Image (tube, coloured by chain):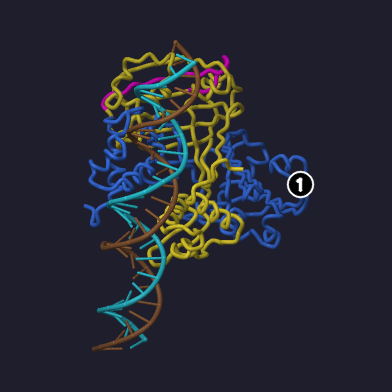
Chain colours: A yellow, B blue, C cyan, D brown
Amino acid sequence: MDATPLPRYLEIRRDIQNRIASGELRPGDAIPSENELKERYGCSRMTVSKALSALVSEGLIQRRRRAGSQVALPRNAQTVLKIHDLKAEIATSGRAYRCEILARERRAPDANELARLGQPVTELLALRLVHFADGQPYAVENRLMNLAVVPDAANVDFSETPPGTWLLNEVPWSDAEHIIRADIAAPALARRLAMPKGGACLVIDRRTWQAGVIVTAVTLHYPAARHQIVSHFSPGAGFSA
Amino acid sequence: MDATPLPRYLEIRRDIQNRIASGELRPGDAIPSENELKERYGCSRMTVSKALSALVSEGLIQRRRRAGSQVALPRNAQTVLKIHDLKAEIATSGRAYRCEILARERRAPDANELARLGQPVTELLALRLVHFADGQPYAVENRLMNLAVVPDAANVDFSETPPGTWLLNEVPWSDAEHIIRADIAAPALARRLAMPKGGACLVIDRRTWQAGVIVTAVTLHYPAARHQIVSHFSPGAGFSA
DNA sequence: CGCTTCATTATGTATAGACAAAAGAGGACG
DNA sequence: CGTCCTCTTTTGTCTATACATAATGAAGCG
């Protein structure tokens, strides 16, 4: 069915993937050496090597010099979680996006904020806003931005392009951390999110760094009734979430 | 400080990573062609190609024939979420693990369960259990296992090795899906988890497939006060969560 | 029996060269 | 002015070869 046939190294990779998935090769089993495989598939060792290297970076097999290649022991469940840009997330679902800035302050961090940032920061921009989808509250965002890293942020009006979207397009990040938790909405928060008092929230804390320096720390509160995180992972192909 | 210097292709890869992280190369900027790079770094084209291919699979750059290579547009926040084996998770934190099986049934699925599984299954093993850490309830698990894929499960006593741990070591999976949400604990659940009535739960639904066939569907309820999901992602190096 | 030493084997890295395929650039032509 | 065609650049794949490096297993020795 393929108009253009797969390149050899992908064919080999897929073949071995299939043998593992089907149970023909079980965890711990040895995989033939590159020299054997190069004869079996009728290609050069480099091509086999490329296929096996891909399987290593997938985590499907392990390789050691002289000892050869083995099917890796089953991994821990590991899935890729892709948290979309909020504006894009709402827009692509066909709903109208809007956000409302509740507070905006430029100042030095207090003790609590320093703890959130995890490293000393001299000046920050603190934002508090609500995101709406089709007029309905979608999430409340509480963001700290390190002005030492993104001084431009001080001059941007975030009512059109929310800070998350702006940062994503402005600053490449090198590290990210997420903490996902659940909580009961405080009365004021429940009101803002148009959810029942005492209802559950999904809370996401995200921090991103660039070359070791913190760029931003953000806390998002979603009403549990209207939001969940879905993530899909298949080692063989690509990711989606 | 490196006893053994990095291989050339990793050096090149890291150099370009640094240029992107430092802002010297901005999203959309062109990266010199392989022929130019091979002269700059004084190596063969294959070596440059290997470095650039790695950057592609990291998502840092894009490449098109004839058009050349560009720094990719900033990605959506994407992080690897690794959900540990519960028993190992508790044990490695130095607490005593124990689990209690509340219900165990071998039968055909009902309509509700079929919907959860997402595909027809003739016979399943349904388990309901509580995990304890140092005697304190840690999570309530609700699991369906497809006996067509794992017939052995019918003969295993899961009181020692909980089903999640057993499956992880027994069956390699090829696809996984997680749904993370928050909810208010129902009274019976709150009692089981020794948490206040009306308190929030973190809920994880996980489904795993092997070669397109569903292996297991599990729902985990954690008391929000005592559990959160932490995940860390740095594109350059490895993952951890 | 335990230790060292050495040869063997498989992987890891690197090279030079070759051809294929995609796609932009520019020219010919209607 | 637009369309089709060819030329050229750049990446994608593949080969054959070479040497480096890690780890194993066997031989030799105290």
At x 32%, y 15%, the residue is: A155
Is A123 contained in the magenta span? yes
- Name the side, left or right, on which B33 lies relative to B152: left
Query: In terms of depth relative to the viewer, which is nearer, C19 or C14?
Result: C19
* Image location of residue B126, percent across then percent down: 71, 50
Q: Secondary structure at mark 1?
A: loop
Label 1: which residue? B109
Is B211 contained in the magenta span? no
- Name the side, left or right, on which B91 lies relative to B61: right
Query: In terms of depth relative to the viewer, which is nearer, A203 or A153?
Result: A153
Task: Determine if residue B9 is in view.
Answer: yes
* Image location of residue B90, percent across then percent down: 50, 52
* Image location of residue D3, percent across then percent down: 50, 19
Extent of the magenta region? A122-140
- Of the 4 image quadrants, the one containing the C terminus of chain B is top left
At x 57%, y 32%, the residue is: A228
At x 47%, y 50%, the residue is: A58
The amino acid beneath tag 1 is: Pro
Occupied quadrant, residue D30: bottom left
Query: In terms of depth relative to the viewer, which is nearer, B123 or B102?
Result: B123
Residue under mark 1: which chain is it in?
B
Query: In terms of depth relative to the viewer, which is nearer, A76 or D8?
Result: D8
Q: Residue furthest left?
A: B1
- Name the side, left or right, on which B33 lies relative to A4: left
